[in-house]
Amino acid sequence: MEDFDELINTANKVYLENFPPTTYFERALFYSWSCQINDCKFCYMSTKPPVKDFNSVRTVASILAEVILCKHFGWKLGFVSGGVGAIPLPKLEELLKYITLVYGDKVWINIGTVGKSFMERVKPYIHGVVGTVECVNEKVHEFVCPSKPLLPVKRMFEQAKELGIRRAMTLILGLGETKEDFSNLKNLMEEYGIEKIHLYGLNPVKGTFFEEKSPPPKEYHAWWIAQTRINFPTCQIECGIWSTKADHVSILLKAGANSVSKFPVLKRFGLKEAFEVEKQAEEAGRTFEGTLTKYTPLTNVDLSCLPEQLQVQVREKLRIYLNSIERNLNKQKISISA
């Protein structure tokens, strides 16, 4: 335990030498819950039939309403994501344009591998591309993600670099990798200039290969974050936690994570798990930017950047989201600030 504590203390020191003592919530903005390949053995979408058309996507209005909530409550957009092939690329380009108009900033995209021509087209709207690496043990990766080989991801990284587009990646811990595989992660990040990494712990999903598996312990999750922080002092590290793992936040932040994600904030806003996340941030010595617990009404939203009909649709979706949050809070008898 002494070695582990020393590792965490070292990682925390490195973090504080490169970042302020703050943290925040990052929201992954999904435009679909369907996928053309749908055979990643950990993924919810693998339990659904593969998408055969472009009808299994959210409305633009619902997506933009969620963007407005992110701005209002101080959540950052971790990335825009969806299943592979779930939306035509021209429509996706238009969606990214609307998101950046409403959000007031560029976004990261995590949409599978895309070609150089598409990256050039959406460059005005994106910070960078996120490669779905998932596992850095090659044998495990081939088994877990049979239709998502790493070579196209690496090619996308190379092309993004040529275009001056930043690179990020996702990694899911608990799929079968071991600590010995960290050297593979280090080599990959160094070779492709990875500036941001989303480090998740496996969340076993009913109906998938991992349904009966156990998620990794928080110490294991923290070990990978700490090693990444020490080896890459300025890298942005996002730790993914679920509502049942809110008590993991403190150790993951002390290990060097910048931010928290995966928490189902629209369903759990203002509830005990949300308070726990903020409490854990305080225990880690971090000031939590934005809020998961303090509700304030949203008024006077400026949507003049959007077509008139879309403005009406966004306002209606926003009303539905806010009413849902308010109902949850009222059930818990939590006050709503005027």
Image (cartoon, rainbow, N blue to C red):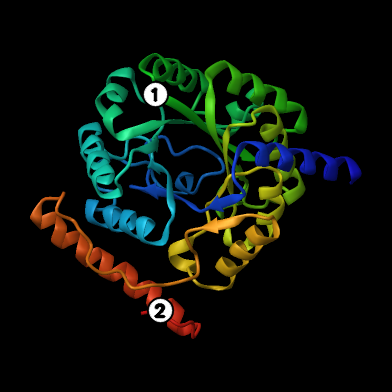
Q: Is residue 326 visible?
A: yes
| Image coordinates for residue 194, horizontal then vertical, percent | 53, 26
Please report the residue visible at 28 percent of the width from the left and 58 percent of the height from the top: 65
Residue 224 occupies quadrant: top right
**In screen coordinates, is 116 left or right of 307?**
right
Q: Is residue 217 visible?
A: no
Which numbered disc, 1 or 2, marks the residue that appears first in the sequence? 1
- Which residue in the structure is indicated by mark 1? 165
Furthest-left residue in view? 308
Circle 2: element type: loop
Furthest-right residue in view? 2
Question: Distance from label 1 to label 2 (Cα)?
Answer: 41 Å
Vertical comparison of 187 with 75: above or below: above
For disc 2, the neighbor class at 10 Å (few under 14, some 14 to 19, many from 20) is: few
Q: Nearer the viewer, mark 1 or mark 2?
A: 2
78 or 84, which is in the foreground?
78
For disc 1, the neighbor class at 10 Å (few under 14, some 14 to 19, many from 20) is: some
Circle 1: element type: loop
**In screen coordinates, is 330 left or right of 169?**
left
| Image coordinates for residue 55, horizontal then vertical, percent | 24, 47
Looking at the picture, which amino acid does disc 1 mark?
Ile
Q: Check contact, mark 1 vs mark 2: CB within 8 A.
A: no
- Which residue in the structure is indicated by mark 2? 337
Vertical comparison of 248 with 6: above or below: below
User: On the rendered image, what quadrant is the C terminus found in?
Assistant: bottom left
Please report the residue visible at 66 percent of the width from the left and 39 percent of the height from the top: 15
Vertical comparison of 11 with 295: above or below: above
| Image coordinates for residue 102, horizontal then vertical, percent | 25, 49
Count the labels in the image: 2
Q: Residue 13 has which mark?
A: none
Please report the residue visible at 68 percent of the width from the left and 49 percent of the height from the top: 252
Looking at the picture, which amino acid does disc 2 mark?
Ser
